[in-house]
Image (cartoon, helix red, strand yellow):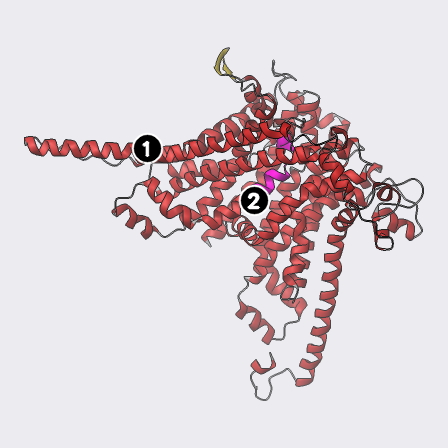
């Protein structure tokens, strides 16, 4: 910075001494800033770290001594994970719920992504009457909290649609693992307004010349969509995909209502919430169980953080 | 007991059906839109050839059916939104004026119940506490942290650590913090908070049972999660401040304190508002944390949790719907403000 400071004539301030004092103070300031930020980062991490350490401690130790004593007397075991993942239903059997989480999440990410990108393309690049109104309508649906949809949507699945005593659509009558379809359906509905909005932002910013050239070459809309638009919006798709993945994997409410609570369909979150309620003191299970549920989103998040942050910023700041 | 892998196969089968359905629907739609217009084009070509051969007047060139394409591109989205959001939202609004099983109209009775029943008023005040504290504290923390680590050497790592809770489910977060708040009557404490209290010479407490303290302890969990979001967005906004403005201020001898209030704050104001509003909306809808940590007992319930209980545990559809509508009314001004804000930002 000093090299950039121009030599100034008489009457201009800062005397050399003050800048030096200023520099010292600045260094001190940045040192305090460093210390404070490290303390805060530690504070933020300690709860997770404590749970993580505990998940590897023997059950009787977790329940009798604090996890911080682990470092004085390290006893390491994988028993908790073994128990909570694979043994009988009373102690978790989380492997089963883990599979449910996967089975729920994958289609619940794919469907809204595909539908939303189709819709976003149409809203941005196909000219038709009332286009703006359709877009505003979809956009406005973001304000509806999903609580507003839960009761009627559940009825839609369980009793179908009747208008004036006439059955128009039958009940879905799903049993066991077929209930996944309900959860996919619900998640797709709830994800669409936001996904369409975000993707529309991206798609509408693609260069118009590109589309025009393709149209002149005789390309149809499906062809333009597949060969030009899709490859170009991959980063946006990745960002929204991660969002939706984290949202669905971590969701409790939708799963609780549409998947039911049995090991046939319930995801990890539902099971964990149940364990936390009924076996709140079985910390050996809760700690290991919590990590089983955390590990997948953590991997996704850490490996794709760049996309995630970009999506976050696109959604909330740039608009 | 051994884990029964064979028992899990139906799930994978179902997942496969789902994926097949996905490919069929999306691929089918695109294929349909490719094949059908091509067929029409060929037919038109044939007509043209026939017409020119016979010397008849050429058939009028029809306008390309853009609208039809748009309709098919939008069809899945519109269908799902209508069935899954529009119609249910209208029905919920209607149900909120009906009795418990939706068989008769009761007018405003459910809303009257909401504002007169003591336990529900408690729920409303709890929600108010949440929605005041979480956005303010989380945003303030995020802002301070973003400023502190800006341009620090370890910035990326430091930000990741704060941001990490965003990836953890609310359920997982609730369990993590329940462990921090854990209590043991005798012997060593296993919860960090009680250990700290004990080592400072205090008495261990059952934190989550003590109202109104427990609500604040649950709020801490939400702040813990949302601060990362605030920090990332605000940090990006701080980095977007043009370098020459900062440089000019620095040459003028601005102190860091002045710099923060006179340059940084006004520049990031739009981002700040977005963050506060976004967190407020998320906080209004908070459900998982309360349900996992206390199940809404000990005076900790919030609107979303009470809505779930009324509608799905007690089968009080009318009351549950009224709570959902009230939630919607609370969220509405925030979202409208957010949208207006975003549009202004875009135009400006």
Q: Which residue is mark 1?
A: B68
For residue B184, above or below residue A35: above
- Where is residue A164 drawn, in percent x and y? 49, 12
Marking on residue A243: 2
Q: Are marks 2 and 1 on the same chain?
A: no
- The stretch in magenta equals A244-255
Q: Is residue B227 left or right of residue A4?
A: right
Question: Which residue lies most toward the top here?
Answer: A165
C-alpha span from label 2 to label 1:
31 Å
**Chain letter of disc 1?**
B
Q: Residue at x 66, y 33 (%)?
A: A97
Question: Callout 2: few (<14), some (14-19), or many (20+) C-alpha neighbours within 10 Å?
Answer: many
* Nearest to the observer: residue A262 or residue A91: A91
Q: Residue at x 49, y 33 (%)?
A: B19
Chain letter for mark 2, please: A
**Residue A245 painted magenta:** yes
């Amino acid at each position: 910075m000093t090299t950039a400071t121009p030599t100034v004539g008489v009457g201009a301030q800062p005397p050399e001494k003050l800048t030096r004092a200023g520099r010292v103070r600045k260094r001190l300031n940045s040192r305090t800033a460093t210390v404070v930020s490290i303390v805060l980062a530690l504070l933020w991490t300690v709860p997770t770290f404590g749970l993580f350490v505990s998940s590897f401690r023997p059950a009787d130790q977790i329940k009798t001594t604090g996890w911080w004593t682990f470092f004085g007397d390290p006893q390491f075991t994988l028993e908790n994970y073994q128990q909570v993942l694979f043994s009988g239903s009373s102690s978790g059997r989380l492997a089963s719920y883990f599979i449910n989480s996967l089975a729920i999440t994958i289609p619940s990410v794919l469907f809204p992504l595909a539908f939303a990108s189709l819709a976003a393309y149409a809203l941005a690049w196909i000219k038709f009457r009332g286009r703006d109104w359709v877009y505003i309508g979809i956009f406005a649906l973001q304000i509806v909290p999903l609580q507003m949809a839960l009761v009627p949507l559940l009825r839609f699945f369980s009793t179908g649609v009747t208008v004036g005593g006439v059955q128009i659509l039958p009940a879905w009558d799903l049993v066991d693992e077929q209930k996944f379809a309900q959860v996919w359906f619900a998640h797709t509905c709830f994800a669409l307004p936001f996904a369409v909005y975000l993707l529309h932002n991206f798609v509408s910013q693609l260069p118009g010349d590109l589309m025009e050239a393709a149209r002149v070459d005789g390309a149809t809309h499906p062809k333009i969509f597949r060969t030009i638009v899709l490859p170009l919006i991959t980063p946006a798709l990745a960002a929204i995909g991660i969002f939706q993945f984290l949202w669905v994997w971590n969701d409790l409410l939708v799963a609780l209502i549409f998947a039911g609570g049995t090991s046939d369909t319930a995801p990890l979150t539902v099971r964990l919430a149940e364990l936390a309620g009924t076996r709140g003191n079985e910390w050996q299970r809760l700690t290991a169980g919590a990590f089983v549920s955390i590990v997948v989103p953590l991997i996704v998040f850490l490996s794709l953080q760049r996309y995630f942050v970009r999506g976050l910023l696109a959604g909330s700041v740039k608009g | 007991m051994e884990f029964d892998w064979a028992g899990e196969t139906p799930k994978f089968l179902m997942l496969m059906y789902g994926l097949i359905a996905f490919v069929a629907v999306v691929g089918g739609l695109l294929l349909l839109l490719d094949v059908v217009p091509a067929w029409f084009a060929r037919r038109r070509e044939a007509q043209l050839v026939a017409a020119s051969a016979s010397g008849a007047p050429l058939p009028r060139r029809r306008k390309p059916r853009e609208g039809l394409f748009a309709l098919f591109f939008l069809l899945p989205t519109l269908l799902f939104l209508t069935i899954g959001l529009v119609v249910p939202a209208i029905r919920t609004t209607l149900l909120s004026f009906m009795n418990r099983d939706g068989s008769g109209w009761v007018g405003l009775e459910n809303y009257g119940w909401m504002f007169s029943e003591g336990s529900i008023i408690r729920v409303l005040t709890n929600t108010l506490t949440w929605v005041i504290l979480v956005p303010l504290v989380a945003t303030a923390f995020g802002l301070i942290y973003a400023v502190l680590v800006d341009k620090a050497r370890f910035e990326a790592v430091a930000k990741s650590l704060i941001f990490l809770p965003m990836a953890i489910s609310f359920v997982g977060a609730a369990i993590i913090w329940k462990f921090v708040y854990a209590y043991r009557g005798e012997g060593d404490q296993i919860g960090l908070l009680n250990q700290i209290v004990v080592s400072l010479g205090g008495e261990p407490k059952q934190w989550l049972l003590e109202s109104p303290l427990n609500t604040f302890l649950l709020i801490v969990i939400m702040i813990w999660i949302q601060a990362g979001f605030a920090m990332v967005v605000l940090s990006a906004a701080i980095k977007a401040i043009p370098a020459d403005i900062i440089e000019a201020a620095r040459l003028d001898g601005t102190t860091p304190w002045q710099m923060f209030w006179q340059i940084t704050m006004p520049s990031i104001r739009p981002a700040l508002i977005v963050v506060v509003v976004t967190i407020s909306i998320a906080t209004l809808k908070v459900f998982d944390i309360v349900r996992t940590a206390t199940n809404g007992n000990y005076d900790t319930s919030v609107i979303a949790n009470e809505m779930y209980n009324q509608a799905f545990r007690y089968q009080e559809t009318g009351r549950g719907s009224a709570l959902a509508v009230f939630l919607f009314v609370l969220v509405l001004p925030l979202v409208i403000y957010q949208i207006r804000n975003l549009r202004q930002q875009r135009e400006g």
